[in-house]
Image: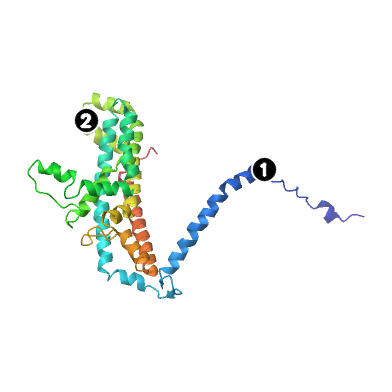
Amino acid sequence: MKDPAVSEAPVSPPKAAKPPQDRSGYLFILPWFIGMAFTIIPFFASLYLAFTDYNLLNVPNWIGLENFAEMFSDDTWWQSVKVTFVYTFVSVPLSLAAALGVAMLLNRGVRGLPVYRAIFYLPSLLGGSVALVLLWRYIFGLNGIVNAFLGFFGIEKISWTSDPDYALTTLIILHIWTFGSPMVIFLAGLKQIPSMYYEAAAIDGANKWQQFRKITLPLLSPIIFFNLIQSLISSFQTFTQGFIFSGGKGGPANSTMFYNLYLYKQGFEQFHMGYASAMAWMLLIIIAAFTGLNFLLAKRWVHYDN
């Protein structure tokens, strides 16, 4: 006689084998998982090293928050923060304004638009390259093109690269010149604004400036916000321009000592890996704070369809 409990127990259906296409998908994303391992492991290793005294040769020695406390008494660290902040908060607004201005010009139905778009976009591809920074040093050198041009107006030669008062300004101009990437994004956003809004505003008597303030800026605000966040994060991480321009010294008189350049010198020239790791985490905190602040302020000026 059969046991009723056994005969009435639900029978689970056999598990279906995963189709071959699923296995192919996992195989394709396997390199991403391997690459993430090379990112996640150093990420958490640097967090541990930030609380240690480590010079690559000895075993890391746990010292708690001493590396972070040392930063606030380090004059060069404060100078690197000052240089990076001035560079970021001067160059980013000017670069975005130049990008938006050129995008609006190109959006007026210019003939040969793809050619102009490529010409303006090209410097942004080369902006952080070694060759372009070297070329920039030549252009702004004592006998360079800029001083030759100023000489026509009777202006004496300026030592753009070796004078602490002008060195950072030269790098800010270089950054503004590489506005091609946000310009292309602005141009795509401008083309999404329906022309009927401008036609209706013109019928109501709005001039070009009023149309820009009341139509273009509000409808383009999500694009402006995106470019602002991208540019801020990129500027805070500036390294190549300062390294090549100053020969890796951050001079003259630490006037181009960017945060990442000082971090590099601490880690790979003086082998203060613990201090360099603490600097890296402090930079992450600074970037996260400014990004979060921008997201909070975005509720006041960024307009979405919903």
Quadrant where the image shows the C terminus = top left
Q: Is residue 131 visible?
A: yes
Q: Nearer the viewer, mark 2 or mark 1?
A: 1
Q: Which mark is residue 20?
A: 1
**Mark 2 residue crowding within 10 angstroms, few (<14) / some (14–19) / many (20+):** few
Residue 281, picture quadrant: bottom left
Q: Is residue 193 visible?
A: no
Which residue is at a point 30% across and 46% down the rendered structure image?
Answer: 132
Q: Which residue is mark 2?
A: 208
Which residue is at a point 32% across and 72% down the rendered structure image?
Answer: 69
Residue type highlighted by circle 2: Lys
Residue type highlighted by circle 1: Pro
Q: Vertically, is 67 above or below 9?
A: below
2 or 223, nearer to the observer: 223
Q: Earlier in the sequence, mark 2 or mark 1?
A: 1
Which residue is at a point 31% across and 72% down the rendered structure image?
Answer: 70
